[in-house]
Image (spheres, rainbow, N blue to C red):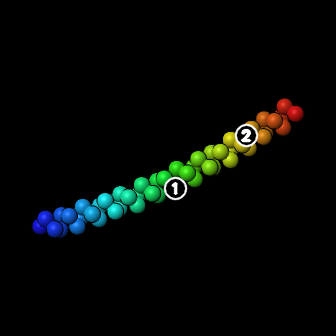
Amino acid sequence: MRAEFRTDLKAVDTRVGNLEQQVARLTGAVEVFAGLTNGRAAARETERVG
C-alpha cells in the first residue's frame, strides 16, 4: 500500500510539473501577445498625433 501511494504521489508530482511548464509557456505567450498589442496601440497613437 505504501508503494502504491508513492507511485501515485510521483505521478501527481509529474503531472503538476508538466502543468507548471504549460502555464509558464502560456504566460509567456500572453506576455508576447500583450507586448505586440501594446506596440500596435502606441503606433496608432503616433499616427493620430503625426
Can you give x and y, in whole percent of width and height, for residue 17 in the image? 38, 58
Q: Residue at x 68, y 47 (%)?
A: 36
Q: Residue at x 78, y 35 (%)?
A: 45
Instruction: Report the quarter where the N terminus lies.
Output: bottom left
Q: Where residue 49 is drawn, which disc sits there?
A: none
Would you identify the image quadrant in which residue 12 lies?
A: bottom left
Mark 2, Cα crowd under 10 Å, few <14 / some 14-19 / many 20+, is few
**Mark positioned earlier in the residue sequence (1 or 2):** 1
Q: Residue at x 23, y 67 (%)?
A: 7
Compared across the picture, whether 24 is left or right of 16 comes to right
**Residue at which label 1 appears:** 25
Q: Amino acid at mark 2?
A: Ala
Mark 1, Cα crowd under 10 Å, few <14 / some 14-19 / many 20+, is few
Q: Residue at x 74, y 44 (%)?
A: 40
Can you give x and y, in whole percent of width and height, for residue 2 in the image? 13, 65
Compared across the picture, whether 35 is left or right of 19 comes to right
Q: Where residue 41 is drawn, which disc sits there?
A: 2
Can you give x and y, in whole percent of width and height, for residue 23 in the image? 46, 53
Outermost residue, top side: 49
Q: Amino acid at mark 1?
A: Arg
